[in-house]
Image (cartoon, grey):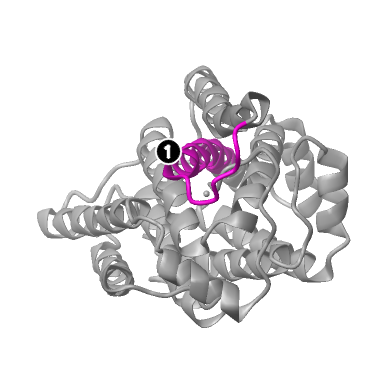
Amino acid sequence: MSAAPYAGIGLALLATTAYNVGLIQEKRALGRMPALDVRRVPRLVASLLADPAWLAGFALMLVGLACQTIVLTFEPVSVVQPILSSGVALVLVLSRLVLRERLGAVESWCVAAMAVSVVLLAASAGGPGTGAGHHADPAWLAAVAIPTAVLGLVVAASPLRRRSAGRPVDRRAAAAGVCFGIGTGLLYGVAALAIKGMSGILTGHHGAASIVAGVAASPYLYVFGGCSAAAMLLYQVGLQSCRASILVPISTVTGSVYFLIAGTWLFHEHLPTSPVKLTLRLAAIAVAGLVLITLSRQAPDPAADGAAEQAGPSPAPVPGYLGRQ
C-alpha cells in the first residue's frame, strides 16, 4: 500500500464524504428551483450558478474529486473505488435526515454492509505487487472510453424522446430512471478513467507549474471535462425530480463497476498475492457491488415520496422528462 499505512483509505473516505454531502446539498437547492430544461443549456447553467446553495454543494463535490485524484496516485483502483462507492450509504443516511426520505429496512442493512466493506478493504491493504498503476496505453484507453461515452449519451438521452412523442411526464417511471442512471454512470465512469490518467501526471512532474502544464497538455483534462459536464447536466435534471435514495445508487453501480473493471485492466494493476488478503479484497468488492445492485433495484416508495413532499417544497415536474442518477 502507501508509505503512510491506511492514509489512502482515509483520503478516499474524505473524498466520498465531501462528494456525497455536496450531492445532498445540491438536491436541497434543486428542490427550490424552477424546473430545469436541458433543451436550454445556457439558461440551465445560469440558474445553477446563480444559486449560492447549489454552488456550495458543487464546491464540496469538487473537493471530493480533488481528493480522489490525489489518492489514485498511490492507491490501486480496487481499493479506492469500493470506498468511493461506500458514499452511497452516506447518501441514504442524509436522505433520511436532511431530505426526509424514508430509509427502509433493506436500505438500513445496506448502510451496515457498506461499513463492513470498508473494514474488509482496510484489512486487505498492503503486500507486494498491489501498488497503483499510473499509465495506460492511449490506443486501448481511447478504444474503451470513446464507445462508452457515446453509449452513455445515447442511453441517458433516450427518455427525452417522450417529449417529441407528446406523452405525459411520469416522475416515477422506472424505465426512464434506469436509462438516466446507466447513461450518466457510464459517462462518470469514463470521467473517472480520465481522473486516473491525470493522477499519473502528478507522479511524473515536479512543481506546480510543471503539473499544470502537463495536465493542460494531456487529453485527460478535456475528456474529464466533457464527460463530467454532459453527465452533470443530465444528472441535475433527474436529481431535481427523483428521490436521491433511489436515483444515486442506479448511477453509482454502473460507474463503479465500469471504473473498477476498466481501470484495473487499463492501468495494469494487480490484486494482492496473499490468499488471505486477496479473499478479503474480493469479499469487500463483492459486498459493495451487491449493495449497489440491491439499491439500484429498489422501487420508488410512494409513501416515502409523500413524506418528502410534506417536509419541504416539491420540485416541479421537468417538462418532457421522466424521473431518472
Measuring from the top left, give residue 316's x and y in whole percent. 69, 57
Structural crowding at the residue carrying mark 1, measured as other residues with C-alpha within 10 Å and reported as few (<14), some (14–19) or many (≥20): many
Provide the residue designation for mark 1.
Answer: 263
Residue found 51% across the figure and 82% down from its top: 97
Measuring from the top left, give residue 267's x and y in whole percent. 43, 35
Position of residue 241 relative to residue 169, above or below, is: below
Q: Is 177 contained in the magenta span?
A: yes
- The residue type indicated by label 1 comes to Gly
Q: Is 17 contained in the magenta span?
A: no
Q: Which residues are magenta?
A: 167-194
Answer with the quarter of the image where residue 7 lies: bottom left
Answer with the quarter of the image where residue 231 lies: top right
Residue 3 visible, this angle: no
Which of the two residues, 182 or 193, is positioned nearer the viewer here?
182
Residue found 75% across the figure and 43% down from its top: 37
Helix, strand or loop at label 1? It is helix
